Image (cartoon, rainbow, N blue to C red):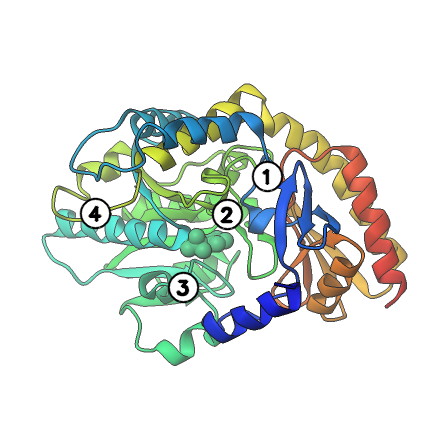
Amino acid sequence: MSKEEYIKEAEESIVHTYNRFPVVFDHGKGVYLYDLDGKKYLDFAAGIAVCAFGYQNEEYNECLKEQLDKITHTSNLFYNVPTIRAAARLKKASGMDRVFFTNSGAEAIEGAIKAAKKYAYTRDGHAGHEVIAMKNSFHGRTVGALSVTGNEHYREPFLPLMDGVKFAEFNSLESVRALVTDRTCAIIFETVQGEGGIYPASDAFMQGVRKLCDERDILLLLDEVQCGMGRTGEMFAWQHYGIKPDIMATAKALGCGVPAGAFLLTEKTAQKSLAPGDHGTTYGGNPLIGAAVDKVLEMMERDRITEHVKTIAAYLEQKLDELVAAYDFLTERRGMGLMQGIVCEKPAAEIAAAALEHGLVVITAGGNVIRLVPPLIIEKEHVDEMVKKLKSVLNEE
Ligand SMILES: *Cc1c(COP(=O)(O)O)cnc(C)c1O
């Protein structure tokens, strides 16, 4: 079948929830992707911040193949070694105390919200607690995650969603403080807003919310699904701020291509939170996924991926700042580490589509932001190649 025929078939059989780019990828190697026709693309999207080690990483692939031939699934009614190892590594990397593995980011957020509610329920002896979330946020598409997502377009058709959620202005401590009541159990936000347009939390906001949470025994729930796992130059972006959340959600690069997510709790939170019978998952943390997560964390730690990200991100930022200075319709660069956005006065989706023609994969965020979330293993030469390709695209605008 030709590419056109595959695309036609897809449009006739898969629910049309995405306006996909007309590309059918076939395989990848390193930081490059290849489509059905063998055309080569430099990948600065990494499957939306997932493929931290790019494609065909031999060590990762071998590990999965070995586990595949041993056992892939047991259910959570039994113990399995890969997942026990993965949990230990995740605890060490985050400094958190308890892990619950999930299959996706949205599912990690769902569990994290339940964990926060259960904490307040145990403490107060009654239910009916509230959550403060942020405008312009994104936490996933399931009903609970959508309930804390501050995007009317995503929410409207599905109302009413989960009760008791209020939305504050991101990076405005006063706006958060104004919404706190005796029933508030958690404040949730992304350390770096991703889908909304790459907005990092300010230092003052992070410190202020942490202090507010401490004063009122409210749980700070950070969504690190996109910005976590080394992407910003620390294993988790909150580690830049000298604070620690009570609950954290991670996913995307956690499995580097196999469906993996997790939420983590501090011991203090866990003591009053989920108990047997409160939560579950059939697939979450199965041996295949556990092996992948264990390997990803082993490689990130051993290869000092965060050091590499810091170095290469400094170069990327410099090059992007030059780009913004050179084109009058590019107005700003925002981001942390290898999670960068270029604010653009033209529709970012058109630029992303044109980039594909030039053999470059970039994605968008918040409508007018070109989002760059490359594999974490990129080198300077790849930054140079990306800039060269992006310039060709921008010169045509
Ligand atoms: C992608 C994302 C999610 C949802 O993850 P899924 O695996 O798509 O369910 C949640 N939060 C943030 C910040 C994300 O970027």
Q: Position of residue 37 (x, y in %)?
A: 71, 55
- Gap in angstroms between the C-alphas marked 1 and 3: 24 Å
Say which label, 2 or 1, has the lower sequence index.
Answer: 2
Query: Quarter holding the N terminus?
Result: bottom right
Say the numbered circle drawn on residue 232: 1
Task: Give the camera-side residue of 101 and 18.
Answer: 18
State yes or no: discs 4 and 3 in contact (Cβ < 8 Å): no
State yes or no: discs 2 and 1 in contact (Cβ < 8 Å): yes
Asked whether mark 3 lies closer than 8 Å to ligand 1, one says yes
Find residue 68 and report its image quarter.
Answer: top left
State yes or no: discs 1 and 3 in contact (Cβ < 8 Å): no
- Gap in angstroms between the C-alphas marked 2 and 4: 26 Å
Asked whether mark 4 lies closer than 8 Å to ligand 1, one says no
- Gap in angstroms between the C-alphas marked 4 and 3: 19 Å
The residue under label 3 is 141
Amino acid found under the numbered disc labelled 1: Thr
Dot 1 crowding, Cα within 10 Å, few <14, some 14–19, many 20+: many
Amino acid found under the numbered disc labelled 2: Thr
